[in-house]
Amino acid sequence: MINFILAQLFGALAALACIISVQFRDKRHIIYMLITETLLNAVALTLLGAWGGLTTNLISLLPALYIYYMGRKKKKPHLLMIIPFLLVLVAGWGVVYSGWFDILPLIGSSVYTIALFLKKEKNIRQLLVVNRVVWLGYDLIFGLLSAAVFDASFLISDTIALYRFRHGHKKSHRASRHWWKSFFAN
């Protein structure tokens, strides 16, 4: 019973860190809060014995640390680094796979890893919505109720942040044939 209560506490703290992350404009601050969220969530998942979620969660910490480190050094992260990070994620997930529900953290962590490599904070926020929807399902399956409530709160917070930052700038954007390049350009 104590593990369940502690898992709820750490899940709530993790979700709060995630909610705070999308309110920042600076990518480094966003990533710092996401690293904090990942560590807190890892503790909650450990307490619940959710090994698939724990494994993919901890592995997704590697690209976050890489992106944060590159940002501190004022260097551009190499886009090709996304491939080994995703391969390690899939390999780690394969080791602990125990049922269909373990597919959810793989999807969520893969989307999270891709989001880290995006240039624009708006695009990061949009992929984090997908990430949160997937983790919401996983949290409900494993009974991490506090995180599930905060996942829903995150979705609301992220929507507000997307709206606030979108309407806070009155730049005109022209359509581009290569719009997809803006996702990964640094």
Image (spheres, rainbow, N blue to C red):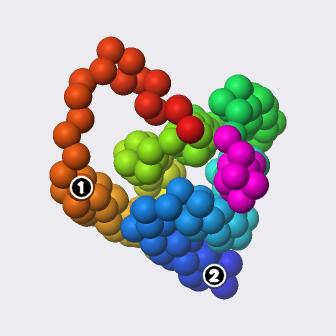
**Residue 18 coordinates in the image, percent (x, y):** 49, 66
Residue tagged by mark 2? 6
Q: Amino acid at mark 1?
A: His
In front: 141, or 25? Answer: 25
Residue placed at 77% from the left, 29% from the top?
84
Residue 45 vs residue 62: left or right? left
* Predominant SS of the magenta segment: helix
Quadrant of residue 65 in the image?
A: bottom right
Is any part of residue 102 visible from this angle? no
Give the percent coordinates (x, y) of residue 91.
78, 31
- Residue plotted at (70% across, 52% down): 74
Q: Nearer the viewer, residue 10 or 24?
A: 24
Identify the image quadrant of residue 77: top right
- State the residue in front, 164 or 19: 164
The Cα–Cα distance between marks 1 and 2, rounded to whole angstroms, is 42 Å
Which residues make up the magenta segment? 65-76
**Marking on residue 169:** 1
Vertical side of 78 occupied by 105: above or below: below
* Position above or below: 101 against 81: below
SS at mark 1?
Answer: loop
